[in-house]
Structure formats: C-alpha cells, structure tokens
C-alpha cells in the first residue's frame, strides 16, 4: 500500500463550537454520567462554576467537527472501506462549561506505512474564548492493506 505523506503538516481552518447546557446534559446522560456538575446547573454554580461542566470526553463533540474535514480530504487519502479506528488520546486544560466558545484547529501530524497498513495521526488543539487550551487530542486511524 502506498501512502501519500505530502499532507503531513497541513492545517485546516478553525471550527468554532458554542457549548450549550442541554448538549452537555444530553452527552452526560447518553454516556451514563451521574456527576451532578454535568447535569445540574445549580450544583455546578454552588461548586463555583458559571454553569454545567462538560465531561472530559465531551471533547469529541466540540472537536469532532474540526476533525471531519481532515478525514475527508482527498489529499490525505483515507480509504474508508478499509478504515479502522486506531485510538484517541487527550490532554485536558481548564474545564469546559456551558456558554464557552471552543475553537478547534487540526494538523495532519503523521502519515506512514508499516506492514502493508497505512497509519494516520491527526492533532487537534481546542481553545476557549479566553485563549486557554482546553484540550489537545491525538486521533489515530489505520487503513488496512487490501
């Protein structure tokens, strides 16, 4: 399998996501979270937050829209028929709360071939309206050899 590493280093326009209270609550409920900070704005305010707090993995919601264009970029060249999710790693900064505006940019960090399989690594960096990095994500994907 031949891979095109020319896209390594390519960045994509930032994507802005307005974090809503109900989206946080829906995500928390859908993932079985029971932490009151995620579900009850009064509990979150009593704990010193201005609104409900997003669970850490809510990062896939606000950064997902920024990762999609990379996945579908013909220059990156992912063959979806053979795609396997390789993994995700996140490093979190300040907590995300309802009302935040999160801007995410994505970089093609690496494209390589090993053992007949293609490996794609993307990095997302998400910052809040105050300029603080709230999450750095590493997204790994494998395209199996035919």
Image (cartoon, rainbow, N blue to C red):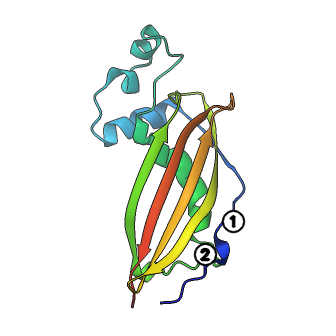
Q: Residue at x 60, y 75 (%)?
A: 76
Q: Residue at x 44, y 68 (%)?
A: 141
Q: Are marks 1 and 2 in contact (CB under 8 Å)?
A: yes
Residue 69: image x %, image y %? 62, 64
- Relative depth, front residue between 97 and 9: 9
Q: Would you name the residue on which mark 1 appears?
A: 10
- Relative depth, front residue between 26 and 106: 106
Q: Label 1, label 2: how many angstroms apart (C-alpha)?
A: 9 Å
- Relative depth, front residue between 123 and 55: 123
Q: Quadrant of the C terminus?
A: bottom left
Lateral position of residue 110 relative to residue 85, left or right = right
Residue 82: image x %, image y %? 40, 81
Mark 2: few/some/many CA within 10 Å (<14, 14-19, 20+): some
Mark 1: few/some/many CA within 10 Å (<14, 14-19, 20+): some
Lateral position of residue 142 relative to residue 19, left or right = left
- Relative depth, front residue between 53 and 137: 137
Quarter occupied by residue 56 = top left
Q: Residue at x 43, y 13 (%)?
A: 42
Mark count? 2
Q: Residue at x 48, y 43 (%)?
A: 59
- Going from N to C along the chain, the mark reached first, 1 or 2, is 1
Q: Would you name the residue on which mark 2 appears?
A: 76
Image height check: is 109 above or below 65? below
């Amino acid at each position: 399998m031949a891979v095109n590493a020319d896209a390594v280093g390519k960045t994509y326009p930032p994507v802005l996501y307005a974090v809503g209270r109900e989206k946080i609550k829906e995500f928390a409920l859908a993932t079985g979270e029971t932490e009151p900070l995620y579900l009850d704005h009064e509990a979150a305010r009593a704990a010193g937050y201005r609104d409900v707090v997003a669970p850490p993995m809510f990062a896939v919601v606000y950064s997902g829209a920024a990762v999609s264009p990379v996945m579908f970029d013909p220059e990156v060249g992912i063959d979806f028929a053979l795609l396997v999710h390789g993994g995700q790693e996140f490093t979190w900064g300040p907590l995300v709360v309802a009302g935040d505006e999160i801007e995410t940019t994505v970089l093609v960090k690496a494209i390589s071939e090993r053992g007949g399989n293609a490996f794609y690594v993307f990095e997302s960096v998400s910052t809040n309206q105050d300029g603080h990095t709230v999450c750095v994500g590493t997204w790994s994907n494998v395209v199996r050899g035919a």
